[in-house]
Amino acid sequence: MGVPKRKTSKARRDKRRAHDYLTTTSLSRCPQCNEMRLPHRVCPTCGYYHDRLVLESEEE
């Protein structure tokens, strides 16, 4: 069974964990209602996707 011969230093450990972090979600502005929404998805506010009405909103 493989057992470490030496203690892993803090620098080596932290270099390995350099990519373990959370990223913020990217948002884009809806061209119809100018609300922030997730890219490549239907706008939850107005229901448009690429200048086409996909979902009927409850306001109308």
Image (cartoon, helix red, strand yellow):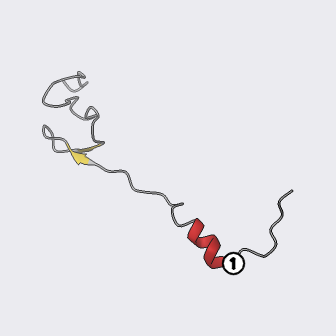
Q: Quadrant of residue 54?
A: top left
Residue 53 falls left or right of residue 44: left
Residue 25 vs 15, above or below: the answer is above
The extreme right residue here reads: 1
Residue 13 placed where, x, y %?
A: 64, 71
Residue 17 falls left or right of residue 27: right
* Residue bearing mark 1: 9
Counting labels gives 1
Residue 46 placed where, x, y %?
A: 21, 32
Residue 10 placed where, x, y %?
A: 66, 77
Q: Residue at x 82, y 72 (%)?
A: 5
Query: Which image quarter is the C terminus in?
Result: top left
Q: Residue at x 53, y 67 (%)?
A: 18
Give the crowd class for mark 1: few <14, some 14-19, many >=20 residues within 10 Å. Answer: few
Q: Residue at x 24, y 47 (%)?
A: 28
Q: Residue at x 16, y 31 (%)?
A: 50
Residue 22 placed where, x, y %?
A: 48, 57
Residue 58 falls left or right of residue 14: left
Which element type, helix, strand or loop, lies under badge 1? loop
Query: Which image quarter is the N terminus in?
Result: bottom right
Q: Give, as a three-letter code, the residue at label 1.
A: Ser
Residue nearest the viewer, comparing 23 with 3:
3
Residue 49 vs 21, above or below: the answer is above
Q: Quadrant of residue 6?
A: bottom right
